[in-house]
Each structure stands twice: as C-alpha cells, then as structure tokens.
Image: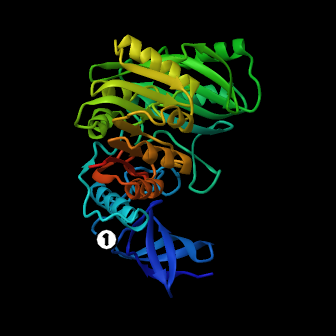
Amino acid sequence: MIGESSVHIKKLVYGGYGLGEIGGRKLLVDYSVPGEVVKVEVLKDKGDYALATVKDVVFPSEERREAPCPYYGRCGGCQLQHIRYDAQLRAKAEILLETLRRIGRLEIRDLDSVVYGEEFGYRVRAQFKVQGSKLGFFERRSHRLVEIEKCLLLHPSINRLIPSLRELSNRAPNISEIHVSYSPTEDEFLIKLISKDFLAKEKLRKIMENTLPKEVKGLGFYRKSQREYYLGRDFTFYSIGPYRYRVSMDSFFQINYLLWEDFINTAMPSNHYNTALELHCGVGFFSLFLAKKSGFVHSYDSSPSAIRDAEYNARINSVDNLFFYNEKSLYALKRHAGEVIDLIFLDPPRSGLSEGEAKLITANRPKEMVYVSCEPTTFARDLKVLTRGGYNLRHVSLIDNFPNTYHIESVARLSLD
C-alpha cells in the first residue's frame, strides 16, 4: 500500500480519474486535473494499480476551477465539476480517440465533431435515493446518502419539486428511491416510487393529493422493479422538431433535452435508403427521423413498453413506412439474414454488440451503418470487429450528453465502399 505522496497527473482517463504514477505503479486519482501536481491519499489497493484521492494541490492546473455545486466531492453524481467545461470537452475527446486507437486499433487522427450544449440544467430525469426523511444521491463508491436541496444538472422544474418529494417520502414509509421524469414540452411530471414494502393504493392517493402539485400527472408504485399500480397517467409527451413522442413510465427517453435535435442530426445518415434495419430503437427517438431517409424501416427493441410507445408514436405522427417489433436484436438479425439491407442503425446498451450480433451484421453486408454508443470501450471493441469485417470508418462524433460527469456518448458512420 502506498502512503501519502506527491504525484504528477498525466491525463484524464475514463471514469473521471486523473492518471498518475509512482515507482511504475499506476494511480487513478479522484478530483485531479491533467498537468498538475497533487498530494494524494490511497483509498484502495487494486493490485496492479491503486485508487487515490487528492489531499492537497501542490501545483494547480489553469483548467482547475472551484466546483459550482456545494455538494461536489461528497455527492457521487458528478466527477468533473472541478475542471473547466472547455477542458472537460477536450479531455473527453482525447479519451475517446485514445480508446479507439488502443482497443479498436483504428488509425484515427481526430473527431469529426464534438456536440455540446449548456453544462447545467440539462437533465429531465432524476433518480433520488431515500433514507428515512433524507432525499439525495449516494456518495461515490458508497451507499451513504448525501442529502441535497437542489442539483445543478437537473432541469429547474425538477429542483422546484424536491420539497414536495421530501414531504412525500416522510408520509410514505420505506420508500428507497423516487424517480422523476419531467416533460418540458408539457410542463408536467411522472413519478415512480420504489419500495420493498407494499403501500395501499388509496393511502398513496391521499398522500399524492396532499403533497404533490397538480403538474404531477402520474404516480407509479413499484416493489423493487415490479410495478404494483399507478395513479393518474402513466405517460407523458415530448416534442422534437416536427414530431411528438409518447413516453410511458417504464420506457426510456434521452435525458439531455438541450441536445435532442443536435444528437439526432449528428446521427442521421446523409443518403436515402430503400430498406433500413434499426436495433434497440426504444420509443422511436431516432426512428421517426430515420423514416424520412428510408423507403422502409424495421425497428426492434426488447422492451414491451418501449415498443407500445413507438407504435403509438408512428401513428400519431402519420409515419406509415416504419414498423416496430418487440424482439431481441440477435433474433432480429437472424430474421433478416440474407435480405438486402441498405442501412443498419445500432444503438446498443453499454455492453455493446454481442459476438453473435457482430457476426450476423458483417455477414449480412449492409451498405452502411450508424453506431450510437454510450460506452467508449465497447464502442472501440465493436468498431474493431466491424472494420475488420470490411467496413470503412467514415465519421466519428462525440456527443456530450452528460456534462460534468465522465460519461461519453458517440456516433460512428461506416460504409463498405
């Protein structure tokens, strides 16, 4: 175990850590900035490396700033608030490029674009942790709760709801989590309560009426991950460009509302296609726009709730060349094996493509692909497989959907020619 030592921080790495080294041994240092010298304390010995945190800044970087949030350093929601936002963007771009070169074995000099917006007030969803009368978020690498009055990442309307949520948690015992979704389009909320114990529907109805504002249109009660019942509506609506989306309580929608249109525009291919296949389509976030670029689009997702919303969204927007299926992506690829597919649009989970999915995609030989990723390591791994399967990497962009955190989203376009 290494004691307190002074360390030079070489660069930022995925996870929000600064990378340092002592005696040939790597240190991953919380709350550090590339280029500075810090005195660190080791938190955990991991064998070939150690986790550490800054105890004192000996020579600060010009990119260091005072974190705007009073909870920063205790609350685990943000990892990069101590770094100026322009420097965060540069660091994320370097992390993505280095990952593509090291894991993907890709000769890529620079990104085609870095898409970003405001660094605060962008989130329209929140998952609050609850312990007794306390409401907030966990410390990093801990289940200790940091009670908060507001979160700078959240839409201001969610912050204004926090006192009501705290009162709700006081009246509804044994609640462990409160999930909030806010629609800036409709100025309304959906709320999910997570509990280990059952709470009678009529009792919760009275609590809802006495604590929550009229803008809360739906309240769902869940025991662990299983929904028991809901009060009011279990869906809301969002608008992006010409399209209107219904999103149910159990469906996913992109969190950063300030970048919705930019994200879609970056991901949309430039050509027109006879037939497109979309995997992990969700409620149709990309699908409706993709249909304008295609003769026919076949879109798949394993979530029944998402597919019900997606089908509804195609109907209300009068999009008749878009077909949704509740099926896993591997089975979707098997279903379309041997067909002529002009474009495959991929938006997989953090785990990326399975080995079977990657093999089926390259075997089917679609002319072009779009790959939307939320995890650079699996993104690079999958691009390595696809490029070795004969595809050329034409475009890579970084989408900073989560400012002040270590998360990186990206978009790649590939083609056979």
Asked if residue 389 lies left or right of residue 107, the reply is right
Q: Residue furthest front?
A: 338
Q: Residue at x 53, y 49 (%)?
A: 351
Q: Residue at x 49, y 39 (%)?
A: 149
Q: Residue furthest right?
A: 197
Q: Which residue is mark 1?
A: 61
Q: Nearer the viewer, residue 62 or 333?
A: 333
Q: Position of residue 29 (x, y in %)?
A: 48, 69
Asked if residue 76 lies left or right of residue 316, the reply is right
Picture quadrant of residue 342: top left
Q: Position of residue 2 (x, y in %)?
A: 59, 82
Q: Residue furthest bottom?
A: 23
Q: Residue at x 40, y 12 (%)?
A: 315
Q: Residue at x 62, y 74 (%)?
A: 45
Q: Nearer the viewer, residue 285 or 173?
A: 285
Q: Position of residue 300 (x, y in %)?
A: 49, 29
Disc 1 crowd rating (10 Å Cα; few below 14, some 14-19, many 20+) is some
| Residue 288 can be seen in this image | no
| Residue 214 can be seen in this image | yes
Locate the N terminus and report the quarter of the image it occupies: bottom right
- Amino acid type, label 1: Ser
Asked if residue 204 lies left or right of residue 410, the reply is right
Q: Is residue 56 above or below residue 383?
A: below
Q: Is residue 305 above or below residue 36?
A: above
Q: Nearer the viewer, residue 216 or 283?
A: 283
Q: Position of residue 226 (x, y in %)?
A: 69, 28
Report helix, strand or loop for mark 1: loop
Q: Nearer the viewer, residue 209 or 247?
A: 247
Give the color scheme: rainbow, by chain, secondary structure or one colour. rainbow
Picture quadrant of residue 287: top left
